[in-house]
């Protein structure tokens, strides 16, 4: 009997106390908080140290040696769908702004970027100047494409297609303080890139693309007439700067560019190639001017995993750490147009480069190139053999 009474008493106590305990326990638990947008900011930088021997019959033009060819310091910011970047660079005793941009990601497929940056135009858009697998970018791209431009770019990054559309002003707008009168003459332009990529898995890629551009004349001469375009490129070494080809096109009306490209990859071997055609219409009955160029790059990983793809940039991603890559490249560029009477010069360039990815921040490069320049008005033909080495740190 006593046992029954005790069990009944315990049961009643449990019924009474349980709701109170449950309520107390629930109140003591932390309530779910709305997810906060995370703000991230991190420093960025790079150091490029080059050294090498320059061998040429015209010895006075080229000096062998060692040089800090690029040093940069900047910051990146991410806040939700927003991002921003600013870079300050030092090279050849000059300090200047590099990338200064603000981006907004509507979705992984739709991206908007505003500021001063390199707008997409073909395969070379996939890598920055220091990440070129050829160590130095093909001369055709440096001469017939543009570097950073102040403007806005929209990018559609779909699974099968990559498409961009840009509006920008002339490059000198960021290097020359334009007064109101000069500002009214500021050149502007449009450009776009379209790439079809039916498959882009690791070790198996195919991409066919085409880029186009239109621009109005830029700052030209002193006093400024704002009716010209200048195309120029140095010999493909950075330890010294020597002009290779240059063409000044005056009385310009407008400019058109067209550039098809192709990327093919299987396992550890890849081929990249691009053709450049630039056409300048001129005033006062002067004949139009045409410049052309093309390069073909054969890449192979000697050891390391197969190549992977960069969706946003539309090209091959940087090989994995501890990879060793061999890159062979041929480039032809001409700024001479007989019909226009302009002889800016022609260049043949062949190079072989070994790239060792020490880790995710460091790359060591060994590079050989043979460059032959001819057909430049008032200048003799020039041959250059260059043996170069680079250690670079990027974070």
Image (tube, grey):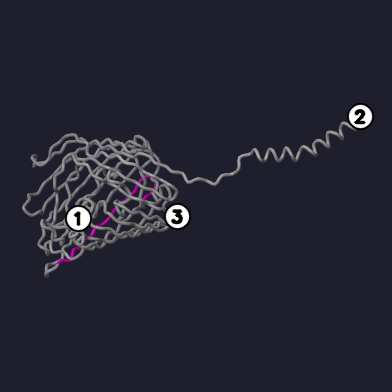
Graded by Cα atoms within 10 Å as few (under 14), some (14 to 19) or many (20 or more), the crowding at tag 1 reads: some
Is 203 on the left-hand or right-hand side of 186? right
Graded by Cα atoms within 10 Å as few (under 14), some (14 to 19) or many (20 or more), the crowding at tag 3 reads: few
Q: Residue 151, located in which quarter of the rendered image?
A: bottom left
Q: Residue 308, position in %: x, y?
A: 40, 46
Is the magenta region chiefly helix, strand or loop?
strand
Q: Which residues are magenta?
A: 265-282
Label ID, residue 2 = 2
Disc 1 to disc 3: CB gap under 8 Å: no
Q: Which residue corresponds to mark 3? A: 107
Q: Is residue 171 above or below residue 36?
A: below
Graded by Cα atoms within 10 Å as few (under 14), some (14 to 19) or many (20 or more), the crowding at tag 2 reads: few
The tag earlier along the polypeptide, 2 or 1, is: 2
Q: Which secondary structure lies at badge 3?
A: strand
- Depth order, front residue of 350/98: 98
Q: Residue 182, position in %: x, y?
A: 18, 59
Q: Which secondary structure lies at badge 2?
A: helix
């Amino acid at each position: 009997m006593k046992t029954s009474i005790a069990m009944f008493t315990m049961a009643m106590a449990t019924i009474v106390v349980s709701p109170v305990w449950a309520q107390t326990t629930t109140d003591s638990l932390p309530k779910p908080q709305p997810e906060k947008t995370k703000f991230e900011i991190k420093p960025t930088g790079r150091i490029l140290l080059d050294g090498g021997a320059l061998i040429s019959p015209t010895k006075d033009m080229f000096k062998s040696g060692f040089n800090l060819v690029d040093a940069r310091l900047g910051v990146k910011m991410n806040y939700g769908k927003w991002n921003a970047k600013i870079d300050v660079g030092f090279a050849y005793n000059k300090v200047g702004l590099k990338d200064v941009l603000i981006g907004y990601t509507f979705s992984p497929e739709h991206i908007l970027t505003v500021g001063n940056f390199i707008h997409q135009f073909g395969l070379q858009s996939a890598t920055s100047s220091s990440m070129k697998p050829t160590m130095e970018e093909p001369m055709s791209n440096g001469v017939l494409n543009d570097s950073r431009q102040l403007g806005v770019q929209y990018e559609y990054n779909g699974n099968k297609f990559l498409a961009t559309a840009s509006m920008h002003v002339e490059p000198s707008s960021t290097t020359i303080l334009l007064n109101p009168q000069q500002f009214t003459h500021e050149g502007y332009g449009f450009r776009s890139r379209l790439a079809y990529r039916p498959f882009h898995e690791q070790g198996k890629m195919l991409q066919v693309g085409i880029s186009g551009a239109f621009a109005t004349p830029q700052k030209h001469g002193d006093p400024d007439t704002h009716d010209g375009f200048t195309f120029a490129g140095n010999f493909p070494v950075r330890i010294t700067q020597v002009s290779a080809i240059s063409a000044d096109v005056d009385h310009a009306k407008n400019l058109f560019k067209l550039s098809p490209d192709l990327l093919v990859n299987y396992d550890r071997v890849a081929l990249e190639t691009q053709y450049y055609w630039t056409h300048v219409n001129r005033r006062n009955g002067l004949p139009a001017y045409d410049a052309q160029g093309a390069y073909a790059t054969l890449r192979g990983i000697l050891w390391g995993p197969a190549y992977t793809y960069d969706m946003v940039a539309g090209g091959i991603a940087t090989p994995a750490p501890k990879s060793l890559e061999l890159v062979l490249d041929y480039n032809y560029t001409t700024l001479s147009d007989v019909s226009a009477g302009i002889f800016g010069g022609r260049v043949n360039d062949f190079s072989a480069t070994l790239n060792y990815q020490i880790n995710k921040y460091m790359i060591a490069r060994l590079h050989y190139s043979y460059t032959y320049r001819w057909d430049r008005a008032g200048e003799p033909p020039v041959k250059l053999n260059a043996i170069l080495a680079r250690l670079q740190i990027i974070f």
